[in-house]
Structure formats: C-alpha cells, structure tokens
Image (spheres, coloured by chain):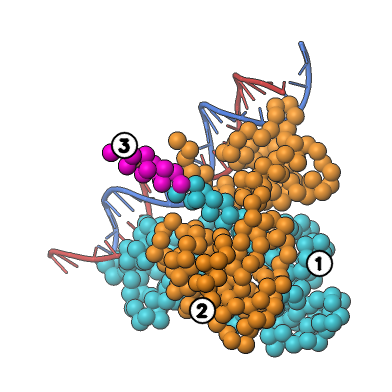
Chain colours: A orange, B cyan, C red, D blue
DNA sequence: TAGATTGTTAATCGATTAACAATC
DNA sequence: TAGATTGTTAATCGATTAACAATC
C-alpha cells in the first residue's frame, strides 16, 4: 500500500525545513517550487516530487504557503512531539551535544547523561547531572527514553548499544566510529561518522586541486601556442 | 577522459577503509569481495565496481590483499599526506574536535584554534593555544592551512567562510547550521548538519514505530480469527 | 590444469528530470 | 476567464546488481 519513502527524500526534508524557516523569519508568505528551487539549487521538479510523497501541500496557481508547509514538514519529521534523549559518554562531544540548545527548540530534550568516569559523577552539564553508567537500568525504568546518543569510545559501543536495546530504546544516534551490530533489527540507527566525513572532504579537496592544476596547464598551453 | 567518480562511491570508501583496518588488526591477509560483502552488508558486485573506479587492486582467483588494499584506499582518500586544520569557534564542539586524537592518525593535524571570545585567548585546548579571530590573516600568512572547520554560530559562518576563501583555503568542514554561500565555487565544502541528522533519525524512528504497531495489529487480527 | 575470483559488460532498478493536464 | 503553478505521469539518467569472460 504505502511504499516506503526513500532515504534520499528523507535526507532532503530537514533542508527544506531549514529554508522554509528562514523564509518565515523573513516574513515571506508564499513561495513557488520554482522560486524555492533557485534558492536551494535543486530542481523545482524534485521539490514537488519530494513533497508529494507526503501529500499535496500546495495549491495550483498559488504555490506553497510558507508557514503551512513549514509546520507540515515539522510534523512529518516528528518535531511537534517531544523526544527525550540520553547521552552515553560525557566527553567533549557528549558535552557539546548536551550544551547545544537548538535541539530543544525542535523538541529534542536531553534528559540524562551517563559516563563510567567516577570523576564526572554529579557534575552538571547543560543543566543535567552526570550519572554513572550502572544507573542506566534504574533510570530507564523511571524515565521515558526515546533516543540514546552514543559518544563513548568505539570499544564499548556495541555492548552498551545492546544494553540500551534491551531496555526498550528504539533509536540510536551513533557517534562511535563503528557500525553497530544490534540484536534487534527493528532499532533505528543514525550514524554520524566524523572521520568518514573528513576523509570525504579530503578526497574532494585533492580532486579539486588536481582539476585546478589541469585547468592551469591547459591555459598555459593555449597561451604559449599563441 | 576520466569521468568524475560519483559522491555515492566516495562516501563508501571510508567505510571500506575502516573494515579493512579491522581485518588488518585481526591479522587477516586476504579477502574476497564476497567475504567482505557478507561482513559489510553490501553486494560483492558493488565492492568490485567501487574499487574498479580507482584501479584493479585485486587478483583473479585470489581476492584482495588486505594490507595492500587498505593502503591504496588510504592513498585515494589522501591519508598518506598531512593536512593542517584550523578550527574557527572554540565552543564545546570545537574543543571536541581539537581533542579528538584519532584524526591525527589519519594525517589530519589541528594547527590552529580561533575564537572571538577574549576569555579564551591563550587557553590551551588539545595542546594548541586559542588565538583571537583577528589573528587569522597573519596566521594564514605564515602557516599552511588546508582545511578550516567551522564550529561557530551560523550568523557569522558565511562572513568568516569567505574570509577564509580569500586567504586561499580550499576546503571547509562546515558544522554551522547553514548552507555556505561562497564567492569561489572551487572551494570544497563538507557539511555536518547535526540537527538534520537528528531529524532524519526522528523520522525513521516514528516510521519504525508505526510499522511495529501495524505488525502488532495484524497479529492480533489473525489470532482473534482463530 | 581446475577452481576461484576478479574486472567488466550488460540488465535491472530506482531516482531525478521533463512534460503537461488538472485546477486554483 | 486567463495565467500561474501544482500534482502526477512519462522519459531520462545514473547507480546498483547480475552475469560471465578473462585470468590468476
């Protein structure tokens, strides 16, 4: 019946959301797929196709109402409901996430911080006290946890991830440099592999450098022929 | 002549690199595309296609030499050469990056930290002193900078990015929640949009939840018919 | 040589773009 | 009503998978 919407589409939705938010701030009331396509550097066709995966949010001859579309996309992405997040691993990255206030505006609320380092116990980070990892089970028993962010070293990631799954947590935001192997395939994992991203940048950087050199050589060749 | 290799392929290369590194650690000497495909949950065909974009690294009847392939992919990704990185914005995220020692093993060396907050001036983070942003130009004049990581608020990102471009920096690792608009189209940008990633997770979480409910309803229906 | 497995071409699948009828 | 722009179908393009000849 309702065939799954591809991840390619899902990945673009937050970007639409962001641009619509900016338009909203600027006081823009309506926008056509064509105008938006120019701003975002995508085709108007793609915008219309993407949106129509979720429903007809526009109106012929008018375009899209910015506020309405913004809210609808927010709803699609689940931003109208609250999501409780716990962070496992209160190193620099964990602290960065705990202090990042923008998440809260989108309904993502950090409600727990866990670490194994006893020096951190009780320390307040982003208004939340750091708990010891052994308190995870009692915490989960008394607090609803929607998402767990893993920012601990990769060596322990797999073990803790499965512990979380056993506690009924259905979504993992994984920053550990490893592909989690979970016992329960129903659990949703989103990976943020910073070093992978850096390597991709490195590759593209070298490629662009090579192209620049080639361009330069071609120009020189041409001018020397003249 | 040499048509550009698609980003889809590039994005998979760091993952191959990671798995090959693990195999190397385990002392595995050779591996076939089929064995690797089982480990990585991709098709053997895709592995062979991906690798053959860069050259024939395998040998018929034998497979791939793990060490050799690992090194070759490292070379393709530019990991055999040193890349100097400066970080603009020494908040929690900037500090997390500065302290992340794994980057150095891949040839990415943090060589400068910049912020506008005078309280941070001279503070040592990850062995590097924090400099004031106004020192950016003299620093760039005396130090080779390959990559700039932007971890400051989005409002200043565009302005600073273009300042970096004018200093000749050709690669930007952008953590600011904005699409940079650069004057020079030759500059390579890699975006890490954490909130986009979190929204994607949120969507997938809800979808998986719905599916579970549907499954459950179907089961109940069947059993009540019995 | 026989068996294994690559490199590569061909077939399929899915995603993007183009086109246009529907409709505000 | 005429003009604009969507929603949607059809065409194209690109990426993935399958197949197999080449070759170690």
Secondary structure character of the magenta stretch overall: helix
**Tag 3 and tag 1 share a subunit:** yes
Badge number at residue A134: 2
Point out which mark residue B160 bears.
1
In the figure, residue B201 lies in which quadrant? bottom right
Chain label for disc 2: A
Q: Residue at x 81, y 82 (%)?
A: B120
Would residue B127 be found to the left or right of residue B212 on screen? Answer: right
Q: CA distance from mark 3 to mark 1?
A: 66 Å
> In the rendering, at what x and y percent does residue B154 appear?
77, 62
Mark 3 or 2, which is nearer the eye?
3
Left or right? Give the position of D11 relative to A14. left
Do tag 3 and tag 1 residues touch (Cβ < 8 Å)? Answer: no
Location of residue A87 with respect to C15 vertically, above or below: below
**As drawn, B18 above or below C11:** below
Q: Circle 3 marks a residue in which chain?
A: B
Crowding around mark 3 (Cα neighbors within 10 Å: few <14, some 14 to 19, many 20+) is: few
What element does badge 1 sit on?
Answer: helix
At which x and y percent is residue B226?
28, 38
Q: Nearer the viewer, residue A141 or A128?
A: A141
Closer-to-camera residue (B124/B141):
B124
Where in the figure is residue A47, as x and y percent of width and height?
64, 40
Discs 2, 1 touching: Cβ within 8 Å? no
What range is drawn magenta here? B213-226
> In terms of image quadrants, where is residue B39?
bottom left
SS at mark 2 in the image? helix
Q: Which mark is residue A224?
A: none
Residue plotted at (47% across, 66% down): A167
Residue B104 appears in the picture as rendered: no
For disc 3, the marked residue is B225
């Amino acid at each position: 019946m309702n065939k799954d919407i591809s991840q390619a589409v899902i990945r673009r939705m937050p970007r639409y959301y962001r641009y619509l938010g900016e338009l909203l701030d600027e006081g823009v009331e309506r926008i056509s797929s064509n105008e938006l396509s120019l701003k975002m550097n995508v085709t108007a066709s793609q915008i219309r196709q993407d949106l129509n995966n979720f429903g007809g949010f526009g109106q012929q001859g008018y375009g899209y109402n910015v506020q309405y579309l913004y809210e609808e996309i927010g709803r699609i992405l689940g931003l109208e409901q609250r999501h409780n997040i716990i962070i496992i691993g209160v190193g620099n990255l964990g602290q960065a996430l705990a202090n990042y206030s923008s998440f809260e505006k989108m309904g993502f609320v950090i409600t727990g911080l866990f670490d194994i380092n006893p020096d951190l116990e009780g320390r307040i980070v982003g208004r939340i006290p750091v708990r010891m990892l052994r308190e995870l089970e009692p915490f989960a028993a008394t607090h609803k946890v929607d998402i767990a962010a893993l920012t601990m070293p990769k060596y322990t990631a797999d073990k803790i991830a499965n512990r979380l799954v056993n506690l009924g947590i259905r979504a993992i935001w994984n920053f550990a440099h490893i592909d989690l192997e979970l016992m329960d395939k129903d659990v949703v994992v989103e990976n943020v592999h910073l070093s992978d991203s850096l390597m991709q940048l490195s590759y593209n950087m070298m490629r662009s450098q090579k192209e620049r050199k080639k361009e330069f050589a071609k120009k020189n060749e041409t001018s020397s022929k003249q």
